[in-house]
Amino acid sequence: MSVNQISVFLENKTGRLAAVTRLLAENKINIRALSIADTSDFGILRLIVDQPEKAYQALKEGGFTVSATDVLAVAVPDTPGALAPVLSTLEAADINIEYLYAFVAKCADLAMVLFKVNDTERAKAVLREAGFKVPQAREVHSL
Amino acid sequence: MWNAEVECMPREKLRALQLERLKATVRRVYEQVPYYRTKFKEAGLEPADIKSLDDLALLPFTAKEDLRNNYPFGLFAVPLNKIVRVHASSGTTGKPTVVGYTREDIDSWAEMTARSLGSVNTTPEDVVQVSYGYGLFTGGLGLHYGAERIGAAVVPTSAGNTKRQIMLMQDFGTTVLCCTPSYALYISEVLRESGIPRNSLKLRAGVFGAEPWSDNMRREIEDKLKIDAVDIYGLSEVIGPGVACECLNKDGLHICEDHFIPEIIDPETGRVLPPGQYGELVFTTITKQGFPVIRYRTRDITMLYDSPCPCGRTHVRMARIAGRTDDMLIIRGVNVFPTQVESVLLSIGQTEPHYLLVVDREKALDTLEVWVEVSEELFRDEVKGLEALERRIHDEIESVLGISVKVKLVEPKTIQRSEGKAKRVWDKRDIEKL
């Protein structure tokens, strides 16, 4: 199972991000990681949360345009040069990365890198084969 | 072609027929309908003053309000015992407009919709599924009688229950579909989602109308359903569907000129405009008995083509409806209708687009910004996906409107929802005029 990322369409104006976080707070949803891709007019907020389905429903009912996307999580050691071989492996397998973002887990000396690729299943397989740690979705959501 | 003798009648002969019928109509409404008598007298007119087709311009206009003021039967030109059918159009405000048909009217109406169906070569071999609503609305019964007139097998499914519509289409071997263009698109979506193979259907043509649509939407319907799709036009005040219909050249709708005289006027001044110019479409009925109308203002915006059509029909063509006079905007001198934007959004897959045209003026130059709410069906998780969407909307709107626009993607519920009709325009230029 892949990691369930929640994406939200946001207009590039004051208070929109605050509105999302307020809504999640009211629903006691914990954000594990987030990233924003933005242009001058709009942005896409991407979230990894502890309860993706609840977050999806709450945001939808709150009037946001939301989508759920499968992303791939890879756990790499929190040391210099750890990410490079992961990317090389994907490159060698000709897997295209649409975007990625990372966060550092507070309890372990690991960094978690989240990938959106054009072929999640194959990416998962080649990374595991190359010996990288691809955690279960459950582990990522509950970090 | 259903009736080549009439549909290809030489123009001179057609004009002579129109004049004879116009004179008779004017005389009849003057004698039978107090409303028209009063209006003619106020204008200082007698029926005998109408000597040529050009004299039509002397007659006063009839507006939707006039119909409403004479609710329900005040404009009928025959006693109620001669009326065999009543239809009504839903009034967005207050009472509906009511129209009555004599047996003769029903007969001429069937002739008109038979011509519409004939334009996609419908014959007694065809199975015609009528998925327009049946009832007070004229769509269902209008097409129904025309299909029967031809002798085709009519399947009167009326609107709704799409899965069942499709099942009947498969089982009965429906060849011609009559419904609104948006319903045709919806049917194609359901077909795709249900994984029903196209070759299980015998569908070959569609006669679509009762709402504005675009050539983009036609292409999409034709592509998805693999059929010929033609546009049919009509309104209950004039008779119902079949007033005009496209031929297979798909370039303008032939108006049944042996039954109606069309005019295009400037909606501001009422002046008659020459062919090729866009304005408000006005109809005078020249055969109707139950509910004749004189110079009825449709509020629909279109133009007339006077060039001959390759199909051989001599009846004048009107362009697709470009919009309504109620919501026409003039931007940099170009007439713009919110429905044009709507048809683009429909054609790129939004089932219920929410959009707003924001008009402003910068340094004496009008600007148009189109705000489009990003629905879940349009939303992409990647910036390049959304940018491509924005570009596509932008390019298609520019090609339809012919003026430059800026497209802005906005969050849902950004655009105000008002009770009843949606607000589609925010004209900031008005503020400056004050």
Image (tube, helix red, strand yellow):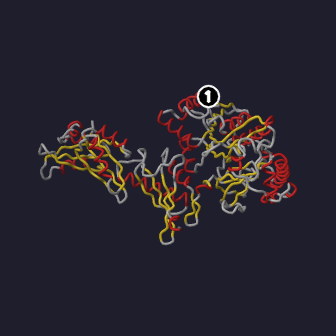
Local crowd at mark 1 within 10 Å, few (<14), some, or many (≥20)?
some
Q: Nearer the viewer, residue B337 or B43?
A: B43
Image check: B141 left or right of B105?
Answer: left
In this rendering, is residue B142 above or below B426? above
Quadrant where the N terminus of chain A lies?
Answer: top left
- Dividing the picture into quarters, in which one does residue B96 lie? top right
Residue at (38% x, 46% y) in the render? A65
Residue at (30% x, 52% y) in the render? A17
Place of residue B360 in the rendered image (x, y in percent of width and height, measured from the top left): 49, 64
In this rendering, is residue B280 above or below B120? below
Looking at this view, name the residue that lies furthest to the right: B48
Q: Nearer the viewer, residue B395 or A97?
A: B395
Q: Nearer the viewer, residue B335 or B271?
A: B271
Residue at (88% x, 56% y) in the render? B48
Q: Total marks drawn?
A: 1
Place of residue A86 in the rendered image (x, y in percent of width and height, measured from the top left): 20, 47
Quadrant where the C terminus of chain A lies?
Answer: top left
Q: Secondary structure at mark 1?
A: helix
Amino acid type at image mark 1: Phe
Looking at this view, name the residue that lies furthest to the bottom: B363
Image check: B395 left or right of A118?
Answer: right
Place of residue A102 in the rendered image (x, y in percent of width and height, measured from the top left): 21, 49
Q: Nearer the viewer, residue B203 or B252?
A: B252
Report which residue position mark 1 lands on: B172
In this rendering, is residue B23 above or below B117? below
Image check: B273 left or right of B26?
Answer: left
Q: Chain of mark 1?
A: B
Place of residue B208 in the rendered image (x, y in percent of width and height, measured from the top left): 62, 43
Image check: B429 left or right of B8?
Answer: left
Q: Is residue B395 visible?
A: yes
